[in-house]
Image (cartoon, grey):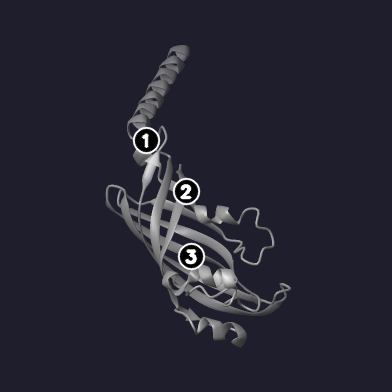
Amino acid sequence: MKKLLIICLALFTIHGFAQQISKQEKNHDTDLKYRVSFPAIILGNIGKGGERTNTQHIELHVKRELDAKNIVGFKFATWRLFQPMGIQWWDGLKDKIDSETEFYPGYLRETGIGISYQRMLWKGLFASVEVLPLYKTYLDLDDKKITNGFKLYNSYHIGYHFAFGKKKQFFIEPQFHCNVWHFDTNTPDSFKQLDNEWDSYFLFEPNLYIGIKF
């Protein structure tokens, strides 16, 4: 009787497990609630080493789907700026880099952890907003610290989510950003003189995010 009970229990467990697998196979796209992604732009810094224009950009996003339309997450980012971020494309951004006329007398390192909200609008089309408090460290050309400060960095995104793979677990998200930083403290005069010549926002930044769901 005991053996029969064990066999029945085992069969019941196997049957339940098989049903669960079948359910997951049918709904695999909705079961992958978490995602990790990074912007492809950071790959461009690989191999640049100590070059003056190496932004040393590292950025990682960890998100969770609340439902089919709403996604929330955390963002970690750090980068090193060699000139003001507010120089627009039409201001000759690339020319300024080539001529080095707007380069800081050192570097600005910014690091922070923020939050994001992504709203799916239609099929893969989405809009998102990110709020990133940044701890600033100003450095001279020998990487010696000058002072610290704080910046509140916000970005607004529009893009499209393309999923692929057997379970649609891999994805890319081409998108455009508009970045704004109105709250910016304790900037050294030598850096501030350059910042004041340009905007406290940057428009139409193209990017491509690469990620995986799990």
Position of 23 relative to 115 (above/below): above
Labels 2 and 3: the sequence-earlier one: 3
Say whether residue 186 is visible.
no
Q: Position of residue 179 (x, y in %)?
A: 42, 69
Question: CB atoms at circles 3 and 1 under 8 Å apart?
Answer: no
Q: Nearer the viewer, mark 2 or mark 3?
A: 2
Residue type at numbered disc 2:
Ile
- Report crowding for label 1: few under 14, some 14 to 19, many 20 or more residues within 10 A (C-alpha): some
Q: Nearer the viewer, mark 2 or mark 1?
A: 2
Position of 121 relative to 154 (above/below): above
Position of 183 relative to 175 (above/below): below
Q: Quadrant of residue 70?
A: bottom left
Residue type at numbered disc 1:
His
Q: Pointer 2: what residue?
A: 210
Q: Pointer 1: what residue?
A: 28
**In this rendering, would 36 be left or right of 79?**
left
- How far apart, in angstroms, are the residues tagged by discs 2 and 1? 20 Å
- How far apart, in angstroms, are the residues tagged by discs 2 and 3? 19 Å
What residue sits 61% from the left and 61% below the top?
56
- How far apart, in angstroms, are the residues tagged by discs 3 and 1? 29 Å
Look at the numbered disc 3 and give the secondary structure of its residue.
strand
Look at the numbered disc 2 and give the secondary structure of its residue.
strand
Q: Which mark is residue 15?
A: none
The foreground one among 208 and 4 is: 208
The foreground one among 119 and 80 is: 80
Residue type at numbered disc 3:
Gly
Q: Position of residue 173 (x, y in %)?
A: 40, 50
Q: Which mark is residue 114?
A: 3
